[in-house]
Image (tube, rainbow, N blue to C red):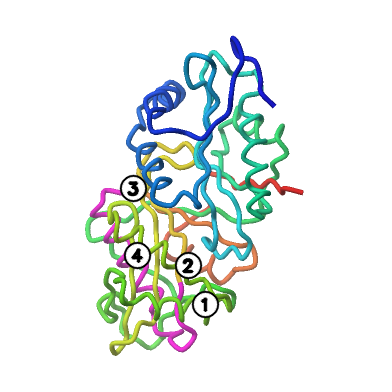
Amino acid sequence: MDVLVKGKTTVRHVARDDLDAIAGIDASAKGASRRAYFERRLAAAAREPEQHLQFAVTDPNAVVGYVFARVLEGEFGHGTPALAIEAIGVRQDAQGLGIGRHLLDVLADDARGLGIPEIRTQAAWNDHALLRWLDANRFDLAANHVVDCALPTASADVAIEEVEPSVHEIRYGDEDANRTPQLARDAILVSAMQRFELAQVVRIDRAITGAARAGYIERLLAEALYDSAIRVSLTARIDGVIAGFLTARVDPGDYGRIDPVAVLDTIGVHPDFTHRRVGHALLSQLFVNLAALRVERIETIVAPRDLGLLGFLYAAGFAPSRRLPFVRALA
C-alpha cells in the first residue's frame, strides 16, 4: 500500500522525534504553530497506548504526512465504540498523491482489528478542501448534533430555563417552578472529582446507561488527576451523597481548531436526584472553571433522539455549531 513521494515511502507509528516535522506541516497549513497540542497528544499516547492510533508516512528524508486518532468508548452517550480522527495532515509538496487516503486505510485496518466499527471526525462547514476529502473517502454526515456556546464573561453565571430532562442516557435536573431563582451551584456542592469517588460515579453511570463502564470512567478520572489543565471532572453532592458528575476536555487543537475550546463529553445525574437542579449546578460550575482557564467556547455532541438534552443546552446558551460531524462505517 506504499505510495511514491520522491521515492519510496513507509508507514509507521509516530515517534517522539517526529514532533518537529509534524508541527511544521501543521503550522504551514494553519498559519499558526500548535506544537504544544501535538506534544500533549504524544504524551497521552505514551500513557495509554491502547487508546491512541498515531501513524506517520515518511519518505527517505522526512515525515510527509500523519494522522492522530483516539478511541471513543462512551463520550457523548455513544454506546458503540468509535475511532475519532483528531488531526491529519500532509506536507504541502506531497499533497494530491494519495497520502491522506493511505493513512486513512491504515487507520481503518487497525480499527477493524480492534473491533471498532466506525471512524468519526468533524470539519468546519466552510473548510471546502477537507469536506471534499471526506466525501471522496466515503465519510457520511452523521446524525448527531454538534452544539456549542460562547462562555459567559465576568461572573459566568448561567441562566437556565426550566426544561424536562431527557429520558435517555444523560439526565439533567430541572428547576422547580415555585423555587426562588438562584445559582444551582450555590445550592448543591460541586467540586473536583476525587479518586475515592470513582465507585459512586460508576454506579451513577450504570444506573443511567445500564452498562458497566468502570474502565472508561477511571480513564477520565486518571487524565483529570494527571493534568487538570486538560481534563475537568466534577461531582455534585446533595446531603453528602454524589448525585451527578461531569467530565470535559480542554485540549485546543482537535479537528484542526486553533481557538481555546472545551468539549463536554460526559454528564450524568442519578435517576433518584432528577428535578433537583443537579445538571444545572454541574454546568454552571463548569462554565466558571473554564472561564478561569481562559477557554472561550464549549462544545458537545448530542444524539438526535435526546431532544430533552438539546432543549436544556439551548436554554443554557448553546446553539448549532458551525462544525459538522462525519462518520465512516467500517464494513
Q: What residue type is labelled 1?
A: Pro
Query: Which quadrant would residue 282 be assigned to in this image?
Result: bottom left
The mark that comes first in sequence, 2 or 1, is: 1
Q: Find residue 258 and report its horizontal and vertical position in percent.
A: 39, 36
Please name the residue that numbered disc 3 is placed on.
296
Q: Earlier in the sequence, mark 2 or mark 3?
A: 2
Q: Compared to 281, does 220 lie above or below? A: above
Residue type for callout 4 = Ser
Say if the magenta span includes residue 286: yes
Q: Do the residues labelled 2 and 1 touch (CB within 8 Å)?
A: no
Q: Residue at x 35, y 62 (%)?
A: 222
Q: Counting residues from the N terminus, which is met first, the one under dot 4 or under dot 3?
A: 4
Q: Position of residue 264 (x, y in %)?
A: 43, 59
Residue wearing tag 4: 233
Label 4–label 3 contact, CB within 8 A: no
Dot 1 corresponds to which residue?
A: 165
**Do the residues bearing badges 3 and 1 touch, measured as CB atoms within 8 Å?**
no
> Secondary structure under badge 2?
helix
Task: Look at the numbered disc 4 and give the secondary structure of its residue.
Answer: strand
Instruction: Find the magenta span and give its range.
Output: 268-296
The span from disc 2 to disc 3 (Cα, nearest Å) is: 31 Å
Q: SS at mark 3?
A: loop
Q: What residue type is labelled 3?
A: Glu
Could you say which quadrant of the image residue 169 lies in?
Answer: bottom right
Q: Earlier in the sequence, mark 1 or mark 4?
A: 1
Q: Please give the name of the residue rendered at 37% of the width and 25% of the height, measured from the top-left corner.
A: 20
Q: Callout 2, which amino acid?
A: Gly
